[in-house]
Amino acid sequence: MKLDETLESCIARFFAFHRRDAPGGVIGCHMVEHALDLLGSIEGQLNAAVETRVCLPDCIQVMTGCTVGNGHLWLQDHIGKFALSFWDRGSLQGVRVYLDVDRLSAEQHPDLVAFHLRQRDPRVLTDMKYRAEVGKKVVEQFMTLKTAAFSHCSILVKLPPKPPMPPSRRCIGCGEPFLTDAPPNVARCAPCADGDTYYEELRS
């Protein structure tokens, strides 16, 4: 498959979407383009999987339209690898591409290796000027390799069966509808049942 725009344009759109410059985005956009080239033409719908939450999901969403929301992007971030896959939804055949540390040289690409192995100086977490300087070096070292930094393999995807969607019930505590198999007279959402929520409501 071929992109409808230049890779440079994709990288610029990634930065705008991601809301900050990130060396992983530059690497990821090259990875997406390379994977699509390897995949070639398909007859069905393009689907993708990503094995990390860092940068790659946004590269895929910006460049291909495969998103979590439309169900064409499958998050496999529990794997924790800087890798992605694309496949034809009809045949389930595709390609997996990953940043291969064995293709990097600690002497020639020290910052890229440290980035990939998460061994950078802890200052990148607190000193944004230093972080930007190191990020620039990571990109410069990657650009001497580009697709030579990647390895790939052909794959057959094992999609899990689509789980049934439970009905919507109104919570007997707060009254908000939510998805549950519980009977209507006992349906209680997680925040009401045990306080399991990501927020605390502020009352004026």
Image (cartoon, rainbow, N blue to C red):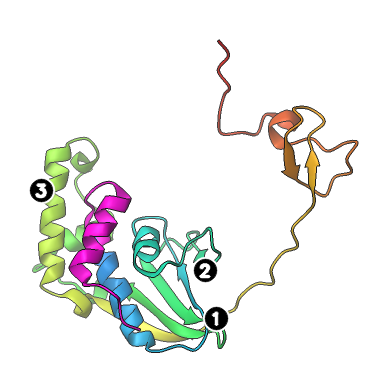
Left or right: where 193 falls relative to 129? right
Out of 67 and 128, give the one closest to the viewer.
Answer: 67
* Residue plotted at (17% across, 38% down): 128
Q: Which residue is mark 3?
A: 133
Q: Nearer the viewer, residue 34 or 144?
A: 34
The structure residue drawn at horizontal position 22% and vertical position 78%, both measured from the top left corner, is: 147
Label 2 crowd (10 A; few <14 / some 14-19 / many >=20):
some
Magenta span main SS: helix
Give the residue displayed 9% in from the left and 67% down from the top. Answer: 107
Q: Position of residue 11 (x, y in %)?
A: 23, 62
Expressed as whole percent of the image width and height from the top left, the position of residue 51 reads: 44, 65
Residue type pointed to by label 2: His
Q: Amino acid at mark 3?
A: Glu
In the image, farthest residue toward the top: 204
Q: Which is more N-terminal, label 1 or label 2?
A: 2
Distance, label 3 to label 1, CA atoms, is 41 Å
Query: Magenta segment range?
Result: 1-25
Q: Which residue is mark 1?
A: 89
Place of residue 174 in the rendered image (x, y in percent of width and height, measured from the top left)? 74, 27
- For label 1, the SS is loop
Magenta span has 198? no
Callout 3 environment at 10 Å: few (<14), some (14 to 19), or many (20+)? few
Labels 3, 2: front one: 2
Residue beneath label 2, please?
72
- Across and down, in percent, residue 30 comes to 25, 71
Is 20 within the magenta?
Answer: yes
Q: Quadrant of residue 165?
A: bottom right
Identify the image quadrant of the C terminus: top right
